[in-house]
Image (cartoon, grey):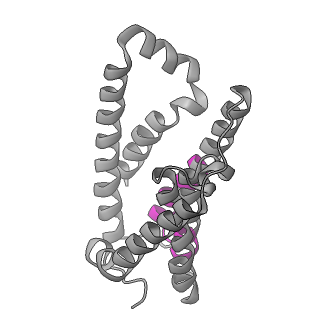
Amino acid sequence: MTALILGLLLFFSTHSARIFAEDNRAQYIAHYGLAKWKLAYSLASAIGLGLIVWGYGAARLDPLVLWAPAPWTRHLAAVLTLPAFILIAAAYVPGTRLRAKLGHPMVLGVQLWALAHLLANGALADLLLFGCFLVWAIASFVAARRRDRAQRVVRGEGALGWDAVATAVGAGVWVVFARHLHGVLFGVVPFG
């Protein structure tokens, strides 16, 4: 559990710089340069993610169960992750209407992914992992939208065709992940 907590602290301290320490981030970049910021950010994030994976895996071996989710929540989680994958894909497919309307579809996708997993899992490690991701994604979205308003960001309308691409990519990755990878990586088959 210690590794999981340390990993979450390290990972989210880097990922929360734009939420809580925008001025410090800007000063660091001005002093050391964007390349060094990206290197430090990436290194700290990778170490944090490694600790999260290791700590969560270890915590799952001897879980402290807080509640027992109903069996149907596994199916609900599987269904909720489909739009999560589509929203994440929309963040990387250029020219989507989803991105034009939502502004930051990736963090909305992370919110859905985390919520889905909170509903379907009831151990302390699950609450820490998915709860932290949910709280961070909500704070990140609010901060990003506030920055957009302050900077008067105007996005184009986007094209429905690009939404179709994002939907196809997100749904395709979701199918592969849910049907094949989730069971191999995490020992849980969403549609099993």
Find out whether residue 40 is within the magenta segment: no
Residue in the picture at 49% in, 50% down? 94
Residue 91 vertical placement versus 183 (above, below): above
Q: Main secondary structure of the magenta part?
A: helix
Residue in the picture at 67% in, 49% down? 157
Residue 178 vertical placement versus 123 (above, below): below
Nearest the camera: 82 or 163? 163
- Say left or right for 26 vs 187: right
Q: Which residues are magenta?
A: 116-136
Q: Where is residue 54 drawn, in percent x and y?
A: 28, 56
Q: Where is residue 119 drawn, in percent x and y?
A: 58, 73
Residue in the picture at 72% in, 27% down? 150
Quadrant holding the N terminus: bottom left
Quadrant holding the C terminus: bottom left
Residue 74 vertical placement versus 130 (above, below): below
Nearest the camera: 183 or 127? 183
Find out whether residue 126 is within the magenta segment: yes
Residue in the picture at 37% in, 84% down? 189
Q: Where is residue 47 drawn, in percent x and y?
A: 29, 41
Residue 76 position by quadrant: bottom right
Residue at the top extreme of this rendering: 31
Task: State whether residue 85 appears in this view.
Answer: no
Nearest the camera: 154 or 26? 154
Residue 113 vertical placement versus 4 (above, below): below
